[in-house]
Image: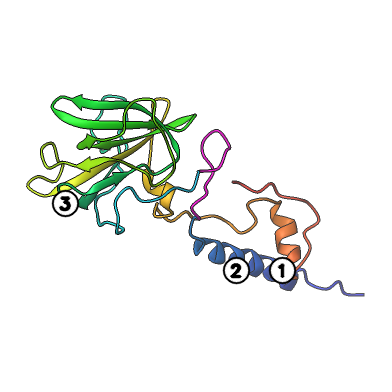
Amino acid sequence: MTRPHPLPALLAVFAGLLTGLLAGLLVQAAPARAEPGGTQDPVGVWPLLPVPEVVRHFDPPDSPYGAGHRGVDLAGHAGQPVRTALPGTVVFAGPIAGRGVVVVGHGATRTTYEPVAATATVGTTLAAGQVIGTLQLPGSHCFPRACLHWGWVAGDTYLDPLRLVGAGPVRLLPLWRDQPVARAIERRGVATIATDVGATR
């Protein structure tokens, strides 16, 4: 008796795997994303309204003293209200190297805003979207245009603040990232693989 050739079944399995991979490439990150510590990103608000143009994106340095851009620059106009992106407490408000800076603490992270003429004082507890000051022209990264340099920091690690408003980069995530590959394929009705293959997150 002739055994059925295994090639058609294998092709079906790989076709299902390829389909899942291609679908996963289209998944865009939601505002809540996993941080290095395993927690989810908080959902924040834009510090300038209406939603501003991003003049320069986040470009973290390769080393603590390396070149890079440790936040994002948002186009605005002098005197425009600046708002805290997340609820928190003002931990610093004052000039640094001639530039007005406001820092708001949010527990494990903090957001930074400059150049800002602070109206909120140290120790003030704020709701998300509450005004902390007004945008200044002197010290602007975009001079002669006014723009807000907005940062987000966890300890000594700089993070992309656009993640707080769902405007960060697209992430390429497989659809089965929370389960073994074999079970993901089985769920799609393609075929069953006898052994589980650990999925890479």
The Cα atoms of the two marked residues, 2 and 1, are separated by 10 Å
Disc nearer the start of the sequence (3/2) = 2
> Residue drawn at (42%, 52%), measured in percent from left and top?
165
Amino acid type, callout 3: His
Which badge, 2 or 1, comes first in the chain's sequence? 2
Q: Which residues are magenta?
A: 30-41
In the picture, measured across the screen, residue 52 lies left or right of residue 42, that is left
* Colour scheme shown: rainbow
CB atoms of marks 1 and 3 within 8 Å: no
Q: Residue at x 48, y 48 (%)?
A: 43
In the image, residue 131 above or below residue 24: above
Left or right? Give the position of 77 relative to 109: left
- Is the residue under label 1 in contact with that under label 2 (CB below 8 Å)? yes
Q: Earlier in the sequence, mark 1 or mark 3?
A: 3
Label 2 residue SS: helix
- Which quadrant holds residue 190? bottom right
> Which secondary structure, mark 1?
loop
Q: Mark 2 Cα within 10 Å, few/some/many (few <14, many 20+)?
A: few
Dominant SS of magenta comes to: loop
The residue under label 1 is 188
Q: From the viewer's side, name the closer residue of 192 and 125.
A: 125
Q: Is residue 46 above or below residue 16?
A: above
Mark 1–mark 3 Cα distance, whole angstroms, equals 52 Å
Residue flagged by tag 1: what amino acid is it?
A: Arg
Q: Nearer the viewer, residue 126 or 115?
A: 126
Secondary-structure class at tag 3? loop
* Residue 197 numbered tag: none
Identify the residue position indicated by label 3 in the image: 77
At x 37% / y 32%, what residue is drawn?
104
Q: Which residue is mark 2?
A: 19
Tell me the amino acid under the disc marked 2.
Answer: Thr
Q: CA distance from mark 3 to mark 2?
A: 47 Å
